[in-house]
Image (cartoon, coloured by chain):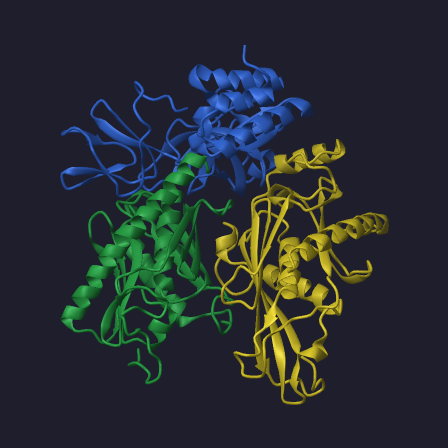
Amino acid sequence: MNSNDGGAELRLVVPGDQIDAPPGTQPGSGVCKRGDSLVATKLGELKIGGDVAHVVPTFTKYLPRSGDLVIGYVEAVMNNLWFLDVGGPFNALLPMSLAPWKVEFGAAREHMGYGDAVLARVMEVDETHSVVATMKGVGLRKIKEGVIFEMPPHLMGLVIGSNGRTLQRLKVASDCRIITTQNGRILIDGNSEGIAIARKALQMIEETGHAPGLHSRLNGILGDDE
Amino acid sequence: MVQLVPQLLRQQLAELAANDERIDGRSRWQSRDVELEVDILYNAEGSAKVVMGDTIVYVGVKFDTAAPYSDRPTSGSLMTGAELRPVAHRKYEPGPPSPESIELGRVVDRGIRESGCMDMESLCIVPGESVWRVMIDLHVLSDGGNIFDACATAAIAALRTATVPAKRFDVGEDFKLELKSTPVMCSYTRVGGRYVYDANEAEELGGDERVHITLGDEGHLHSLQKGLKGVLMPEEFAEILAQAGVKCAELRELIHSKEA
Amino acid sequence: MMGGYGDIKLLNDDGTRLDGRAVDEMRPVEIKAGVLPVADGSAWVKHGLNVAVAAVYGPMEAHPRKIQRQDRAVIDVRYNMAPFSTSDRIRPGFNRRSREISKVTAEALESVVLVERYPRSKIRVEIEILAAEAGTRCVGITAASVALADAGIPMRDMIVGVASGKIEGVVVLDLDKAEDNYGQADLPMGILPNTGEMAFLQMDGDLSIEEYNLACEYNYKAASEIHVLMKQALLDSASRGDA
């Protein structure tokens, strides 16, 4: 990270800090108005671009958005409904009508039960943050094999890298299938040595975050980048 | 306090166990790094802080005077309290003491009490009238797995470096609490089908039952507890008991190294 | 609050206090963010001999249903003093003082957290006092603010907890234990350092209007000093790459 816009200094802000921005700048995410000025509402890096000021937070919890690819864990099953823990404040509901199987009423548990993991997509989120998920879509399925790594969602960008370069390196070095999602959960599937390499690299990213020197640390685990 | 246990995690732990591996790369009997500090709480007469991986606990020892039990007129008393407060983990909900926190307090207490490390007669002030009451409080700030060993280690370290505040109670000069021995607890959890030492958070979440063993200086057993649903065979117990013999001795050295 | 006891002298002849501080001098303060690995956000604050640790979890679904608000998040604060935090051990269990402090602290935080962003949710704030030496509710507020920022909970400003009081007829900043026990007034505040608003305000004892004004001035001065440390703690944590 630390790809600065034209060599500008990294400007970290804390909640309450007044932001120096050209008049007419609009508040983006992590910024709010206080009278005529703009104020940061989160701890993170301030970015002013176009006519919007926003803060890239150093830590953020996952908040579901329509279209997000997510890995959920079945937390409860009712007759025609699964409740998925997707790492957000609320569980997502997966109704039978949006599941890939033809399910008899009351037989939901036979297909997927408590503790199962599923690759799904967020279909809609309403203003009260009620979330509906769907499994109708390419690649969406119950996850039967593999390891799920929990990465803080705001670090997902580091895992993917610019143009997907870092993710590609991880896949090649570990010889594993790796699927990244919007809710911070990463699916790794392959042989145990490969999984161990991928885990080690992801663990390092989680621990050191945006601290400079990421690529050299990755080289240490994955081997040098060609 | 019910946590969602992902099936894939249990699957993964079983595969790792079959390969003699653990989720964080440790070997089967290897512990996380243990950091121990003593005498770090201003108002406590004895105190210790233990950090093991993501687990952070504080233990405070406080004294006051009380009337002795009528059947033990010259004997001091010992009590151990534990609270698993919501600060320590998302899964801990506010409310009255949970069975888990009560178990934690009682198991740590048993190891210390049954070892006889404290000479309760030395805590007599006026026979039949007043004795010292030793109060240990276990305070978990972050539960990253194996809070039992973290608390037990901190508790004995806090006791061994405690000063009895006689001056404040107007019964003489302050004196160091002298312990006769150092009981140490080692806990083993069944993860992926086999017992390992010092389970971390993921291993506890996807694991099964646990066994807590407290050994004294001579390697004698002073307390045992098996917690959570599950069963074990005598050979399995023999194996972890042998491991505890080694590990408890190592922890004992660490505890002694912090004493003045 | 009692009037001074006859034989306890809290002010030296040269006007300094028992610990050598001037009347408008604060006790030393240290602040760290991101200290509890398992929490979403956390902070550690040492103020004089006070030590407070705060953890934040959330936002999460508000349970039980009856506390849920359809249009906003609720802030669920637990202020707790560890049994070994005071000279005489505190028996664990329901404590009225802690319950009251939890309530007013939650209400203070509700005026800075952008709660409308998270309808039907709750944000848990767990404040643990590990060592107490007068002013614990203020240290708790400061720790809670830093922990909330560390957890990425959006706030329009932070809140700094500070207190001033009166001893032997003299207004002083930041009472220590003896001054709190034997002094004549205590004025704890929670101040928003960027707007100057007060989100937390309590007082007990005896203060004239002029004395209140001076105590208030001392509090504002101290709040800006502590704010610098709060900011530094968060920036350090951000550069370390702590999640």
The answer to whether residue B162 of the structure is visible from this angle is: yes
From the viewer's perspective, tell me whether residue C37 is left or right of residue B7.
Answer: left
From the viewer's perspective, tell me whether residue B230 is left or right of residue C49.
Answer: right
Chain ID, blue in image: A
The answer to whether residue C68 of the structure is visible from this angle is: no
Q: Residue furthest front?
A: C14
Q: How many marks?
A: 0
From the viewer's perspective, tell me whether residue A77 is left or right of residue A9.
Answer: right
Chain ID, green in image: C
Q: Nearer the viewer, residue C128 or B119?
A: B119
Q: From this view, report whether residue B109 is shown above or below residue A109.
A: below
Chain ID, yellow in image: B
Who's the residue at 23% across and 60% down the image?
A: C218
Quarter holding residue B152: bottom right
Q: Return the x and y of residue C195 as percentages of the image width and height.
A: 20, 49
Q: From this view, report whether residue B82 is shown above or below residue A204.
A: below
Q: Nearer the viewer, residue A66 or B248?
A: B248
Q: Residue furthest top?
A: A226
Who's the residue at 45% across and 30% down the image?
A: A211
Q: Return the x and y of residue A203 as percentages of the image width and height.
A: 56, 31
Classify the position of the N terminus of chain A by image quarter.
top left
Q: Return the x and y of residue B138 as percentages of the image width and height.
A: 58, 62
Classify the position of the C terminus of chain A by image quarter.
top right
Who's the residue at 56% across and 19% down the image?
A: A219
Who's the residue at 48% across and 54% down the image?
A: B87
Q: Residue furthest bottom?
A: B128
Quarter holding residue B27: top right
Q: Nearer the viewer, residue C210 or C159?
A: C210
Q: From this view, report whether residue B135 is shown above or below residue B107.
A: below
Q: Return the x and y of residue C213 as percentages of the image width and height.
A: 16, 65
